[in-house]
Image (cartoon, rainbow, N blue to C red):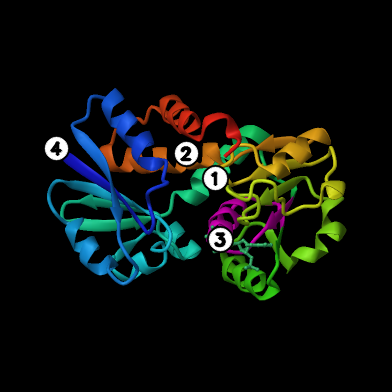
């Protein structure tokens, strides 16, 4: 039997084991996806375990997405530019590091919204999730502004990504949102504000939202955040983080197995587990 892991701390609440195990089963693959709770500081020893012959690879999650890069020699260009690895693939005795959050997140967005060319995109947050999304969006010729509570973090993110970006990148403080939101086409929340169990919170005061926006919240629990509910009331288009979760997983699945991932099934499994969207 072949093995895959999700390595993080904690990992108990992850949707990924159910999603990938259902996909292995549906395709009749003799494989299992297991949880690997690995405490900070113990990652190196665990990574060695991934070199065993029956291991296909791993998903990497908080708090190891940056640290893992110190233990793996072969890191692809996207993951390097983002500064984080979320997928490790084991082939022929070599471990390769990738980041499927950027491609998964932007694929979900462009499917729902359409092409981003020429759009004004405002991204809230400058943490790990923002680095992946901002990298992905900035491959396209559009205007991107990153707003963060701590403006220094937004500045360093933008300065890191600017040299390779096709988009025009700027940054500011989260409290400047009122000045930006009127001209924004696509508003993306990458902050943790509104995530379960704090699902009555929103990073955007309701009064600022308008019907000309498309609002993408990368949070998937709850499936419909307060921000998305408020935006819908104003007639804005909305997208939750569920598709991003599924697409980043599907891309990893394809790299591990070489098989076409059963995306609809993977999404159904995640939605069933998240159950109704109340978090
Ligand atoms: P992740 O890897 O999930 O992005 P992170 O790196 O801890 O997590 O980043 C969390 C993001 O949410 C940051 O942009 C953070 O803002 P700061 O950099 O200013 O801390 C943002 N965030 C968290 N709580 C917030 C709050 N109450 N209001 C505004 N932004 C918040």
Asked if ligand 1 lies within 8 A of label 2, the reply is no
Residue for badge 4: 1
Q: Residue at 33%, 30% (x, y): give it.
A: 23
**Which numbered disc covers residue 247?**
2
**Which numbered disc covers residue 105?**
1
| Residue range highlighted in magenta | 121-144
Q: In what quadrant of the picture does the C terminus appear?
A: top right
In 3D space, how far apart are the residues under numbered discs 1 and 2 (Cα atoms)? 7 Å
Q: Nearer the viewer, residue 43 or 111?
A: 43
In 3D space, how far apart are the residues under numbered discs 2 and 3 (Cα atoms)? 17 Å
Q: Earlier in the sequence, mark 2 or mark 3?
A: 3
Give residue 32's position: percent from left, percent from top.
23, 38
Badge 4 crowding class, 10 Å Cα cut-off, few under 14, some 14 to 19, many 20 or more, is few
Q: Residue at 38%, 63% (x, y): give it.
A: 64
**Which numbered disc covers residue 131?**
3
Badge 2 crowding class, 10 Å Cα cut-off, few under 14, some 14 to 19, many 20 or more, is many
Q: Nearer the viewer, residue 43 or 254?
A: 43
Badge 1 crowding class, 10 Å Cα cut-off, few under 14, some 14 to 19, many 20 or more, is many
Q: Earlier in the sequence, mark 4 or mark 2?
A: 4
The image quarter in which residue 180 lies = bottom right
Instruction: Classify the position of ligand 1 by quadrant: top left, top right, bottom left or bottom right.
Output: bottom right
Asked if ligand 1 lies within 8 A of label 3, the reply is yes
In screen coordinates, is 194 left or right of 44? Answer: right
Do callouts 4 and 1 mark residues in contact (Cβ within 8 Å)?
Answer: no
For discs 4 and 2, the disc positioned in front in the rendered view = 4
**Which numbered disc covers residue 250?**
none
Dot 4: what SS? loop
In 3D space, how far apart are the residues under numbered discs 3 and 4 (Cα atoms)? 35 Å
Question: Quick check: is 249 in the magenta stretch?
Answer: no
């Amino acid at each position: 039997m072949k093995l895959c892991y999700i390595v993080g701390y904690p990992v108990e609440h992850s949707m990924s084991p159910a999603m990938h195990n259902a996909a292995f089963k549906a395709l009749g693959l003799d494989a299992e996806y297991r949880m690997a709770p690995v405490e900070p500081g113990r990652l190196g020893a665990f990574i060695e375990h991934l070199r065993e012959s029956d291991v296909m690879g791993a998903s990497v999650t908080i708090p190891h997405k940056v640290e893992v890069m110190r233990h793996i020699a072969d890191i692809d260009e996207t993951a390097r530019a983002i500064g984080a690895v979320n997928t490790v693939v084991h082939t022929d005795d070599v471990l390769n590091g990738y980041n499927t959050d950027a491609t998964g997140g932007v694929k979900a967005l462009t499917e729902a919204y359409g092409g981003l060319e020429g759009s004004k995109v405002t991204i809230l947050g400058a943490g790990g999730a923002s680095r992946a999304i901002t990298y992905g969006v900035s491959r396209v010729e559009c205007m991107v502004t990153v707003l963060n509570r701590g403006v220094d973090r937004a500045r360093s993110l933008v300065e890191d990504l600017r040299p390779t970006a096709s988009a025009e990148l700027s940054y500011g403080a989260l409290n400047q949102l009122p000045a930006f939101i009127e001209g924004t086409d696509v508003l993306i929340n990458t902050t943790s504000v509104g995530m379960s169990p704090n699902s009555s919170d929103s990073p955007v005061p309701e009064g600022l939202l308008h019907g000309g926006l498309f609002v993408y919240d990368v949070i998937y629990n709850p499936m419909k955040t307060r921000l998305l509910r408020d935006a819908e009331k104003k007639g804005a288009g909305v997208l939750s983080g569920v598709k991003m979760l599924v697409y980043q997983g599907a891309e990893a699945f394809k790299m591990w197995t070489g098989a076409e991932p059963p995306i609809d099934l993977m999404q159904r499994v995640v939605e069933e587990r998240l159950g109704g969207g109340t978090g």
